[in-house]
Image: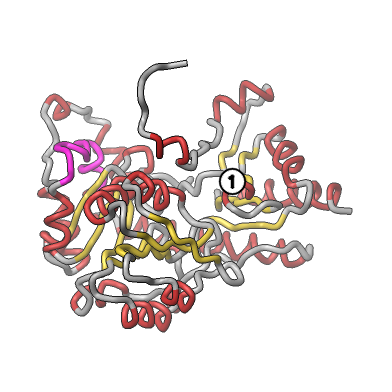
Amino acid sequence: MTNIKIKPWISSLPEYIPGGTIEEIKEKYNLKEVYKLASNENIYGPSPKIIEYFKNGFSDIKYYPDSYCRQLRKKLSRKLGVSGDSIIFGNGTDQIIEMVCDAILCKNSNVIVPDPTFLTYEKSALKNEAEVIKVPLKNFRQDIKSIIKSINKDTAVIFLTSPHNPTGTIITKEEIECALENIRKDILVVLDEAYIEFVPEKYKVDSLKYLKQYDNLLIMRTFSKIYGIAGLRIGYGIGSSEVISNITKLMQPFVVNSIAQVAAILSLEDDDNISRNVDTIIKEREIFSRRLKQEGIQFVESYSNFILIKAGGRSTKIIEELMKKGFMVRGGEFLGFPGYIRVSISLPEINKMFTELFINLYREYNS
């Protein structure tokens, strides 16, 4: 046993359990093909413009990246219609979450999160010795009224997500406005919109318009999902320039690498590719959902690129059998939903193979 004195609170931190890799599953089950449907990645991948650009090599990586992301900042600010100094970039939104908590939380403060939700919110709060108040979901949705009622004098940050991970449900326009109107102005409201592009237009809320009225709102988005560059790790936040400026002071230099910055810029220049991917994923999600309904299999209506499905009491066995056939999914026990599985939307032919296999296994283990 080590004699190194680790901070006592670290032992109580919840542990993130990563999913397996494609190569690991291939080796374990002696498979030639493995389909990863476990991590909400965009299987359609990045814009072809990115692939074409980097065919010419990576000569510029001998230099440090632009720590202020100037070209990307300019491009994104124009696209979103916000000022450049109201944007913060990070090594994924995980880093932005961590910086928000580092900047605001302390031992005598608390953060409110829906439960269950993305684990990074809780870990980043506990790191700062803050209390985490968990408000249970209601019918798989965030209970905005209960979240508001949970606020006390020590509340400093509230995390909301739309679409929510792992359920795929959304917060309505009325709910967002209710939250912003009833949450104290000294509490930072972080609205995580990592999956916003997968929401059909008629359900989508223009959250950016609230930034002018509420300087305690910070919106987070990412290039990992619809833009298909999860492996490059780049996310961003938009909020009050004063809040952003102070949080940015915590950032280490060069956290967003040069390749990620170029890839993000090229992604923003390829709206046609993004639109095609969005349309295809929404269409496939609808086909997927209809098939489950036909079989009477319960699932949560999703507005994201994944679906939370009730697999039953023997879900662990079903997950194992799926892996033996080359399909990697995320077990619901880790996500806070025992008996469920979370499945990412993939290519049409993969979705079809998966649904038929899953339905057969569901019948076998739930008969």
Choose between 331 and 136: the one closer to the eye.
Answer: 136
Numbered disc 1: secondary structure: helix
Q: Position of residue 268 (x, y in %)?
A: 25, 55
**In the image: residue 274, left or right of residue 243:** right
Q: Position of residue 288 (x, y in %)?
A: 64, 60
**In the image: residue 80, left or right of residue 84:** right
On whether residue 67 falls in the magenta region, the answer is: no
Q: Residue at x 32, y 78 (%)?
A: 180
Choose between 184 and 114: the one closer to the eye.
Answer: 184
Residue pointed to by mark 1: 334
Q: Position of residue 163 (x, y in %)?
A: 46, 64
Choose between 148 and 131: the one closer to the eye.
Answer: 131
Residue 359 seen in render: yes
On whether residue 262 falls in the magenta region, the answer is: yes
- Label 1 crowding class (10 Å Cα cut-off): few <14, some 14-19, many 20+? some
**In the rendered image of this protein, does residue 343 appear above or below residue 169?**
above
Residue 197 seen in render: no
Segment colored magenta: 250-264
The answer to which image quadrant residue 291 occupies is bottom right
**In the rendered image of this protein, does residue 39 appear above or below residue 311?**
above
Choose between 48 and 296: the one closer to the eye.
Answer: 296
